[in-house]
Image (cartoon, rainbow, N blue to C red):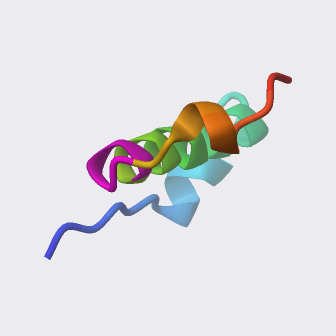
Amino acid sequence: MSEFLLMYDDVRQSDSPDAALMEFLQSTYEAGANLAKWDRTSLERKA
C-alpha cells in the first residue's frame, strides 16, 4: 500500500513549519492527481 507520511515533529522542528506542511500537501496532491490522471487544468485555478 502506498502511503504519504509526514511526521509531526518534522514539521514542528522545521525552520518554516507552514512552508514544510504546504510543500508536503502540494506534493501529495500532485502525485495523487497525476496517478489518477485528473484533468488538472480544469480542476485547478491559478493563485
Q: Is residue 46 magenta?
A: no
**Where in the figure is residue 17, as x and y percent of width and height?**
71, 41
Q: Nearer the viewer, residue 39 or 7?
A: 39
> Up-down: is 2 above or below 18?
below
Tell me the quadrant of the picture where the N terminus can be found: bottom left
**Where in the figure is residue 19, as x and y percent of width and height?**
71, 32
Q: Nearer the viewer, residue 33 or 38?
A: 38
Question: What's the magenta region?
Answer: 33-37
Residue farthest bottom in this picture:
1
- Image point 47% across, 39% down: which residue? 27
**Splitting the image into 4 quarters, where does residue 4 fall?**
bottom left
How many numbered dots are placed on residues in this image?
Answer: 0
**Splitting the image into 4 quarters, where does residue 15 fall?**
top right
Q: Is residue 35 magenta?
A: yes
**Splitting the image into 4 quarters, where does residue 26 fall?**
top right
- Image point 46% across, 62% down: which residue? 7
Tell me the quadrant of the picture where the C terminus can be found: top right
Residue 14 in sight here: no
**Where in the figure is residue 44, as x and y percent of width and height?**
70, 37
Residue farthest left in this picture:
1
- Image point 79% across, 32% down: which residue? 45
Residue 28 in sight here: yes
Q: Nearer the viewer, residue 24 or 12?
A: 24
Task: Tell me the chief SS of the magenta region.
Answer: helix
> Up-down: is 22 above or below 3?
above
